[in-house]
Amino acid sequence: MSDDIAVTGIGLVTPGGTGTEATWETVCAGRATARVDPVLTEAGAPVRLACRVAPPAEEGVRGRLWRFDPATRFLLTAAREALASAGLEPGRWDPGRVAVVVGTAAGGVATLEAQHRKLLASGPRALSPMTLPAFLPNMAAGQLALELGATGPALQTSTACASGATAIITAALLLRAGVCDVAVAGGTDAMVTPLCASAFAKLGALSRREDGPGGASRPFDRDRDGFVLGEGCGVLVLERTAHATARTARPLAFLAGFGATGDAHHATAPHPEGAGLRAATALALAGAGRRPGEVDHINAHGTSTALNDAVEATAIRELYETGLQDPSVTSAKGVLGHTMGAAGAIEAALTVLTVVRGTVPPTAGFTAPDAATAGIDLVRGAARPQRVRLALSHSLGFGGHNTVLAFTAV
């Protein structure tokens, strides 16, 4: 379509590795990254499993680490890789035509928790002067815009675990409106903290398989018992196709359509019939000018929780039952855990890589479905070679947020 958005760069910082190639290799190998976390253990968190980003993940910002929350450090590193892969160099563009859009579920929550502990232990004088700039939810986008010298719109989106995907949709809307030529868009979160882990445990959302961390996150599996808390960042460079063509950049793929809906059903549970997900899918396919039977692949939200996986599998099974061929389905959360507001952007990047490289990563941790998750073509065991011309990426979030991104091959 004439208003397709070109994806010209990718950057990743995840528990699977710092950099796109490291993460892709880990996800394609199906190597789970969950471990019993020493920080959560020391804090006495009721669930201690986590998928951490391994240091160092802050190339180029190490001398300024004290200024930034970990989520911002992840973002600066991933954005640097994404721009390099797109062949874009800050300072050699029109800064007013560059937008920054970043999704996050919790902002700089690690900083907030650490500084609150200092306040309680030692009083106000112990606080860092960078407390507010480090934890305010808008500051990841603000710091990235400062780093890049980008003076176009700098926005932060927050739709819980759909935040990164919402950022990509927002960036696409800015591009289509002609507000900018380039958008650096993605999601970042660093919620592996005592407060967040304890709060999710209180909701009953986390896996408690501490005796077997490698098999704790098991999307769509009959024995799933919750997700593993993760952290990380994904960044896409999006451009108006005409702009990418003018600078002779070769797109990796196109963002051809997208949909965003709200369930208006429950604060934390998805709609039992997946109504919002179905509606978002219809919007994404309509925007791409495609039909359900043309979908080759779905990167599922696939959290490894009882409700999400059942609802999502049912929606997939019923949406594509009239197609000539079932789309392949995978979830990266068996490897990376649930990276919260970063998940939608990380998984969008993985979806683009699937389109580009003709490989669908496996769903780690899966052994067998239950009645609710059966009947979908879940890739398991090993990565699967597949020609993918149209792929969807699902992201769902607390509050009933549903997003679907449709990517097409070049």
Image (spheres, grey):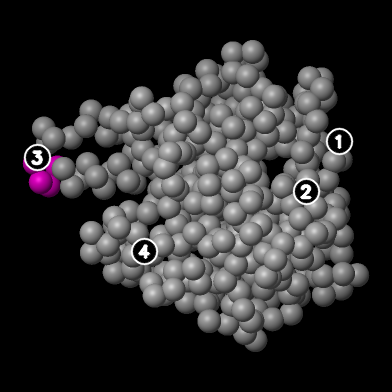
Sequence order check, earlier mark of 1 and 3: 1
Identity, as a three-letter code, of the amino acid under mark 1: Ser
Residue labelled with disc 2: 357
Q: Nearer the viewer, residue 356 or 134?
A: 356
Determine the CA span between mark 2 and mark 4: 33 Å
The circle on residue 123 is 3
Kind of residue indicated by mark 3: Gly
Q: Marks 1 and 3, how far apart in space?
A: 58 Å
Marks 3 and 4, how far apart at CA: 32 Å
Q: Nearer the viewer, mark 1 or mark 3?
A: 3
How far apart marks 3 and 2 lie (CA) works out to: 54 Å
Q: Nearer the viewer, residue 166 or 15?
A: 15
- The residue range painted magenta reads 119-123
Precedes in sequence: disc 2 or disc 1: 1
Q: Looking at the image, is 405 positioned above or below residue 75? A: below
Q: In the visual, does 215 lie left or right of 392?
A: left
Q: Kindly give the residue lying farthest to the right in the view shown.
A: 324
Left or right: where does residue 297 sit relative to residue 157? Answer: right
- Where residue 203 appears, as percent x and y from the top left, is 37, 70
Q: Are marks 2 and 4 in contact (CB under 8 Å)?
A: no
Q: Is residue 282 visible?
A: no
Query: Of marks 3 and 4, which one's residue comes earlier in the chain?
Result: 4
The spot of residue 42 in percent (x, y) is 23, 59
